Amino acid sequence: MEEKAQEFEFRVGDTITVSQKINEGKRERVIGFKGQLIKVRGRAGNRMITLRQTMGGVEVERIFSVDNPTISSIELVAKPKKVVRRARLMTVSPKK
C-alpha cells in the first residue's frame, strides 16, 4: 500500500481515472471513475482525493482513499492547459 502513496504524482486540475474493484457475490469487476481532481488531502499514508465528473448534466463528486486496497489503479488522462494555482479547485463548481 505504501507504493501507491509514494507514486502519487497528480496535481489539482488533472483529469484522472480511478479504477476500483467491486465484489458482487462470487464475481469481481472493475469500475472506472473519470473526473477532474479538485482536492487532495492528507499525506503519504492517509491521502484522500476528490474527483468531480459531469453525468447527464449533473455534477457528481466522489472521494477516494488512495491507499484503499480496492483501488486497482489511478491513471492520468490529461493535464490542464494552464497551471492551476489552487489547493482546492472549487471554482469549477456550479453557481448557486
Image (cartoon, rainbow, N blue to C red):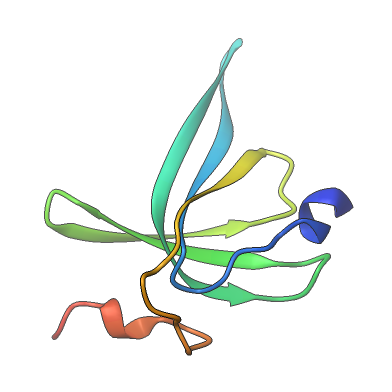
Could you say where residue 78 lies in the image, as x and y percent from the top left?
Answer: 43, 55
Q: Is residue 88 visible to the viewer in this orientation of the structure?
A: yes
User: Nearest the camera: 18 or 25?
Assistant: 18
Left or right, residue 55 beside residue 30: left
- When asked about the image quadrant of residue 6, the answer is bottom right
Left or right, residue 37 beside residue 55: right
Could you say where residue 52 lies in the image, as x and y percent from the top left?
Answer: 36, 62
Left or right, residue 94 beside residue 33: left
* Residue that appears at 63% across and 66% down: 48
* Residue that appears at 41% across and 81% down: 89
Left or right, residue 46 beside residue 32: right
User: Nearest the camera: 90 or 12?
Assistant: 12
Could you say where residue 70 lies in the image, as x and y percent from the top left?
Answer: 67, 38
* Residue that appears at 60% across and 64% down: 10
* Residue that appears at 15% across and 84% down: 95
Would you place residue 49 above or below residue 67 in this image? Answer: below
Q: Is residue 1 visible to the viewer in this orientation of the structure?
A: no
User: Nearest the camera: 81 or 5?
Assistant: 81
Furthest-front residue in this view: 81
Would you place residue 25 above or below residue 85 in this image? Answer: above
